[in-house]
Every structure is written in C-alpha cells, then in structure tokens.
Amino acid sequence: MSDEDPFRIAMLAILVPTMAVGVYHRLQARTGERISHKEEGILLAIALRLAGLCAWLSVLVYLINPAWIEWARLPLPNWLRWSGVIFGVLCCGLMYWTLTNLGKNLTDTVVRRTNATLVTTGPYRWVRHPFYVTAGLMLLSATLLSANWLIAVSGLPVAILLAIRTPKEEEKLIEGFGESYRRYMAATPRYFPRLGSRK
C-alpha cells in the first residue's frame, strides 16, 4: 500500500455517494419536458461543461495513478490533507439536503421548469445557491485530499463560470417568480450564510 492509498480511498468514499445522490435526484427530476440551454448562452454552456470535464479528469487521473500528476504535488501536512474529509462529508450532506429540497425543480441550466416552485426551505433558507456551494466544497475536499494543485487549477474555471452564470440564472428566476424572488434575494445571501441567528 502506497502513502497515497488512504487519501485515494477517502476521496472515493466521498465521491461515490455524492455522485450517487446527484445522479439519483437528476433521474427523479426528469419530467419529459425539454429544457432549452440557449438561454444560458451556448458558449457559456459549452465552456462550463468542458471545464467540468477537465476537473473530473484531473481527479480521475489522481485516483487511477497519483504518480502521473506527481509534478503538481503540494507540500501539505497530513493533518491538513485529512481535513479534506470534513469538507467532503459536508459536501455529500449538503448535496443530499439541497437536491431533496429542490425536487422536480432541478435542471442543469438557468431555465426553470414550467411548473417550477420557488424553494426557500432547507439550505435555500440560508443561501440562494447551495448547489454551487456544494461544488466549491467538493473542489476544496479533492484539492486537500490529493495535495495537488492541478486539481485546484482545473476546478477553478468551473467555480468562475458558475459565478458568471449566477446573475443570468437569477434573472430567469425573477422572470418566473417576480416580486417573491426579489424579496428572497433581499433576505438571503447568494453563497455564504450570514453570521448570527436567522428568524
């Protein structure tokens, strides 16, 4: 057993259930309705999916053989690397909580479903985009566990593109939900919960 094996096993133990939750909820959200990606912008849609593919490929390379990307290794102490498990477990829990509350509203673009409802429960009570927070936690977890800057750098464009896409998504939500969404925006932060109690 190599020194990297425990970290690879931990990463797999986080990725498999997180991905399983995501796939399950995507399948459950299918309604047969065709959702257009044109509103998102073809270039943004393609760039986001290609960036996501690159991020996943870098993680896959690490899982198959860390020696292939040894040149990008970060000199992190083991205690810091193991903290990636905490972020990974948070990621898995947040993924489940988010998608369970989102239900049939889930789409992979900025366009909402015809019968969509405004979700303000669960993690949506605290932030408007908990799914994007989940993506950030996954990137942080994978970077720490692998101690590899290539994984961080390959995931960074995904985070940037999601941030670019967010205002467009919110425009569509305002179109669909009007004043209700504006009030929700005023009361709920975009990505980071406010410190202190919430009534």
Image: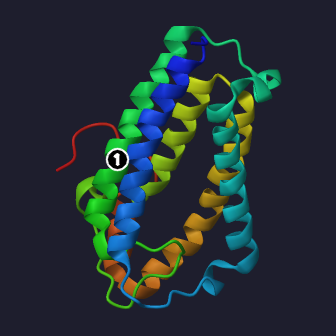
Q: Going by the image, does 143 lie left or right of 135?
A: right
Classed neighbour count for the residue bearing mark 1: other residues with Cα under 10 Å, few (<14), some (14–19), many (≥20): many
Instruction: Give the residue drawn at x 61%, y 66%.
Output: 165
Q: Quadrant of residue 37?
A: bottom right
Q: Where is residue 112 in the image (x, y as percent from the top left)?
A: 44, 82
Horizontal side of 23 relative to 150 (left or right) equals left
Q: Nearer the viewer, residue 186 or 132?
A: 132
| Nearer to us in this view, 97 or 128 | 97
Q: Is residue 151 visible?
A: yes
Numbered disc total? 1
Q: Is residue 11 left or right of residue 64?
A: left
- In the picture shown, does residue 105 fall above or below 90? below
Instruction: State the residue position of label 1.
Output: 94
Q: Is the N terminus in the top left, top right, bottom left or bottom right quadrant?
A: top right
Looking at the rendered structure, the kind of residue marked 1 is: Leu
Residue 137 lies, in percent from the top left, at 49, 40
Furthest residue in direction front, as rendered:
1
In the rendering, at what x and y percent does residue 72 appear?
79, 25
- Position of 73 relative to 149 (above/below): above
Q: Front-most of 183 and 42?
A: 42
